[in-house]
Amino acid sequence: MGANSHRTEFRKKLFIYTFLGFVIFIFLLVVYMLLPFWQALVLALISALVFFPLRKKLKKILFSDFAAALVTLIVILAIVVIPLTVLFVVLGQEIVKLANTINQYVQSGNLELLIEEIKQRFYVYLYKYQIQYPFLENLLNEEHIKKLINDLTQWLSQYFTKFTKEFLFWAANTVFQLFVYVLTLFFALYQGDKAVYHLKRIIPLEEHDKEEIFRTINDTVTAVIHGTVGTAIIQSIIAFFLYMYYGLPYPLLWAVVTAFFAFIPPFGTGYVWFPVTLYELLLGDFQKGLVGLAVGLFVISSIDNFVRPLIMQEKIELPYVFLFFAVVGGLLSFGFTGIFLGPTIFALFITLIKLYEQKFAAPSPSMKDKPTELEIEKN
């Protein structure tokens, strides 16, 4: 009896370990297959989490999970995806046109005229530096500048040809990723609550611990959304006044464009305000250019790293320094999705540490149980 019981127990453990190993192996294969789409999947799940309350309200009205999910998806596409897609398509077309224009400009020889104009504009400064620093004379002579122009022309021609091909590939990949995003978003809205229910069932924790983990994820993602949108609004308002200071036409339009670019790593709003500032400097308006550069670097761009964590701190129970590293580290590690993943990972880590402390850590001795200094001296 004892031997049979031992053999049965061994077979049961062997089956469990084999089954778990097989499940882990298959799970890793699934993750590997999903890696090419991971950013679209993460963004779809985040969008579903944010808009799921709307889906619940619609279900009470429409009495159908499918209809509620479909209407919610249409709302998301109408207010988020379609405007962004149109913006990127138009922007992409303008970038290609700009690349072709610059390429034609360079090949037609107009670049030499531009260099000559800049040289004439800054002739006094160039002449001054040539006298003070004789080694600059070779750099600023006519032959050297012509050689630089020829080299630059060849490089730009090759670069723009390569850029056009890469842009077309990027556009095709973006369309496919958008399809993955929409498909995943719909099914997350349609059957997301069932998936969460089954996920909770297989997590080997007590019910209130599971609720704490899922509450942390929900609060963190919501806080990041509020922080990111709030930061973009503040940055666009400051940029609006900067563009008015420059005398730029349609400053409100440029401020809206700046708000959209605030969501795009790694430079965010710098994609807009820096070229405008550089243009002012090239025109010779150093006062406006330097003021704009200071505002852009130390006010607009720094809001990403300092104001966003402050806004998020209201809902996320994390120290400011943790939030700072979570946001910046998430961006550097995962790109745009890191804005959400970084704080979520940090918040989950802190939550798991607290759960471990509650379950397994030895209780702290009370003041009464601690030995006095006199007792320590006696021992």
Image (cartoon, helix red, strand yellow):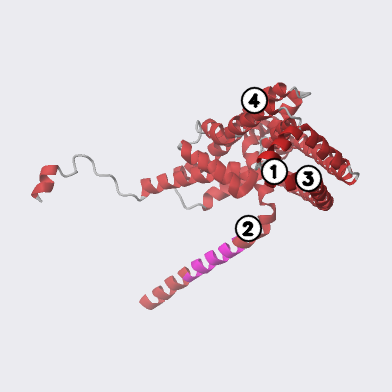
Identify the secondary structure beneath mark 3.
Answer: loop
Q: Which of marks 3 and 4 is nearer the N terminus?
A: 3
Q: Which of marks 3 and 2 is nearer the N terminus?
A: 2
Q: CA–CA distance between discs 3 and 1?
A: 61 Å
Residue under label 3, please give it: 141
Please tell me whether the stretch drawn in magenta is mainly helix, strand or loop.
helix
**Image x and y of residue 195, in percent:** 61, 47
Q: Which of marks 2 and 1 is nearer the N terminus?
A: 2
The magenta segment: 14-27
Q: Which residue bears the numbered disc 4? A: 238
Residue 3, relative to residue 339: is it above or below?
A: below
Q: In which quarter of the image is the N terminus?
A: bottom left
Amino acid, disc 3:
Asn
Based on the displayed image, in which of its 4 quarters is residue 4 positioned?
Answer: bottom left
Residue at x 62%, y 29% (from the top left corner): 295
Disc 4 marks a residue whose amino acid type is Ile
* Residues at marks 2 and 1, CA–CA distance in whole angstroms: 18 Å
Given this view, does label 3 or label 1 mark the residue nearer the observer?
Answer: 3
The CA distance from mark 4 to mark 2 is 42 Å
The amino acid sitting under disc 2 is Val
Q: In this view, does 365 lie above or below 36?
A: above
The image quadrant that residue 341 belongs to is top right
**Residues packed near mark 2 inside 10 Å, few (<14), some (14 to 19) or many (20 plus):** few
Q: Place residue 110 in its image quadrant.
A: top right
The one of 61 and 248 positioned closer to us in this rendering: 248
Residue holding disc 1: 185
Measure how far apart labels 3 and 2 are at the Cα level.
59 Å
Query: Which label belongs to residue 31?
Result: 2
